[in-house]
Image (cartoon, rainbow, N blue to C red):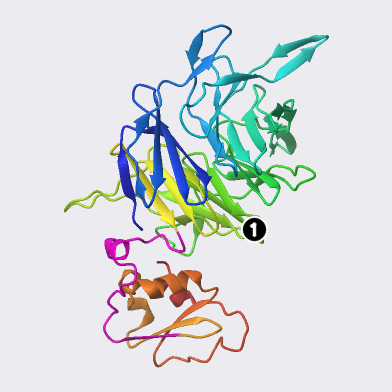
Amino acid sequence: MRWESLGSGVYSPVAVSPGPGSLTVLGRSSASELLRADWRDGAWDAFESLGLPVALLEGSAAIPVEWPLAACGNSRGLLHLFARGPDGELLHMHGDGDPWTRFQYLGAPAAVSGTAAIPMGLAGPPAACSRGAELVDVFVVGQNGGLLHTACERGEWTEFESLGAPSARLDDTATTVPLSGPLAACSFGGRLAVFLRGHAGDLVMKCWDGTVWGGFESLGSPGERDPVYPAVTFPTPLAGPPTVCSWGPDRIDVFARGIHGDALHRVWNGEYWSEFQSLGMPVQEGPSGSVLPFTGVLTACSWGPGRLDVFGRAIDGQLYHAWWDGDWDHDEVERHDPGRRLAEPEGARYSVTSCDLRILMDQPTESIPPHNLPQPIRRLIRQARVAVLVPRHGEDGAGCNGRRTRPTPTAAAGLRI
């Protein structure tokens, strides 16, 4: 997997797609200015400063907004930015180019006491997603630790509605657990999903099916193999809040930082959730080749079916970017000559059948180094629903009767590429 650097001096990044084939990354400079870089025609522009993001008060008074920001884009190419004000207000800025407007106050959730409405404020940064050209949904955590939701349709904002908070059983008693930390949200096929890091470090989700909201559901934690007993897997907490994107009604991609500083990825394909997969971390150039753990939150977006873009700031202060277009691997050979076929290991013979992918080699399957497999075969393995590794002299007829076949333990170990 290849992570490319987009430069240094960019903090609290947020990625958004204004439309198919385009990307925008916003971030904070060391002077708290709003930075912007766009991906155009296959290349990144340099980050430019849009000035200090401020919220307008009555008259001409302006005050800086809090970081991090939330962003989403609609089908008309309009970008929406949201932030928390210094007193807990929800702030909104939108634009489709230069000049950008300043943040405007949208108000804050309030508690009613008699006939008086008492502003309570937001407890953390907002999350936002767009449904079509005229509908934007915003989610925040209230001062009582509950999830709040408001929406804007054709310029009209709704009142904040409470979506509750997760609960946990302590001493056989259900206890409400206040939310904390940043949220992430996405729309998919007219539905909504909100994600957060649970109190136990697990991934928690709450969904709206188009009619009603479901409850808070734990999707579990990443698993790590025990170094002494590799057959045993134990859960590990997420080291940062999740970020999420979707390219259609049957696809959700969630990313978060793992305990080793690597980027973790999990996918919903419309039927079930995959396990967490590590996407690794950047590698320092030079002889040392040291890994560079991510230090902050990740951000991700999708401009359309079959495309994912992930960004994160690493320990060297650089902002890194990786993308998926059917494969996470994009080496220099493919970048400059995508049609070139990489060299195959000596003595290897490959064949693809209608029911599975078989790699027939003279050497034992345990000794096949995954990184030595040619790129076309690695892609086929990832895309195949079933992949079986067998020696040349092994039985090569099993699994070709149309039934779904599970790889053997040895083969499964060889397929982690």
Quadrant assignment for the C terminus: bottom left
Residue visible at 75% across and 12% down in the picture: 117
Which residue is located at x 32 percent, y 43 percent? 6
Q: Mostly what secondary structure, the magenta segment?
A: loop
Q: Amino acid at mark 1?
A: Asp
Position of residue 1 measured from the top left corner of the image (x, y, whole percent): 36, 58
Height in image: 74 above or below 326? above
Q: Which residue is mark 1?
A: 250
Q: Is residue 323 left or right of residue 405?
A: left
Q: Residue at x 64, y 60 (%)?
A: 272
- Within 10 Å of the Cα at label 1, are there few (<14), some (14-19), or many (20+) other Cα atoms? few
Residue 327 horizontal/vertical position (percent): 43, 63
Query: Where does the magenta region start and end?
Result: 325-351
User: Toward which corner of the image does residue 360 lie, by quadrant?
Assistant: bottom left
Does the magenta portion include 417? no
Position of residue 157 relative to residue 168, above or below, is: above
Q: Is residue 257 visible?
A: no
- Furthest-right residue in this view: 114
Q: Secondary structure at mark 1?
A: loop
Q: Quadrant of residue 399?
A: bottom right
Q: Depth check: 282 or 30 in front?
A: 30
From this viewpoint, which residue is outermost toward the front? 98
Examine the rendering and report whether any part of residue 275 can be seen. Answer: yes
Whether residue 344 appears in magenta in the rendering, the answer is yes
